[in-house]
Image: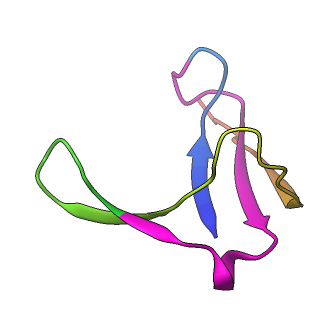
Amino acid sequence: MYRCLLQSFFGLGFGQSVDIDIVLDGQETRKTAEIRTEDGRKERHYLYLDGETISGKVCLSLYFIVIYR
């Protein structure tokens, strides 16, 4: 499962935020590759070939930020 937190359009932390959960079908049998990040850490990522059809589910959870002054 991949997760990321997106901030507002301007990236200033004002307005709405959203959690995006992406679950692709067949992850338990999908081949993976070990990728080294820019800071030297190793991460495992799923492999998909060119032209391969993928399917799954996406869940968006919206959050409102209220600022009191």
Foreground pick, 42 / 53? 53
* Residue at far left of view: 40
Let me know if residue 31 is in the magenta part: yes
Is residue 57 left or right of 2 when viewed as pictured? right
Where does residue 6 sit, x and y in percent of width and height? 61, 39
Residue closer to the observer: 35 or 38 = 35
**Is residue 26 highlighted in magenta?**
yes
Q: Position of residue 49 (x, y in %)?
A: 63, 48
Q: Quadrant of the C terminus?
A: top right
Residue drawn at 64 percent across, 70 percent down: 1
x, y percent for residue 41: 17, 60
Residue range (magenta):
11-33
Q: Seen from this angle, which residue lies furthest top?
A: 10
User: Who's the residue at 82% across and 56% down the image?
Assistant: 61
Q: Is residue 59 above or below residue 23?
A: above
Q: Is residue 51 above or below residue 45?
A: above
- Percent coordinates x, y for residue 9 in the rendering: 66, 18
Between residues 31 and 21, which one lies in front from this camera angle? 31
Indicate whether 67 appears above or below 12.
below
56 relative position to 64: left or right: right
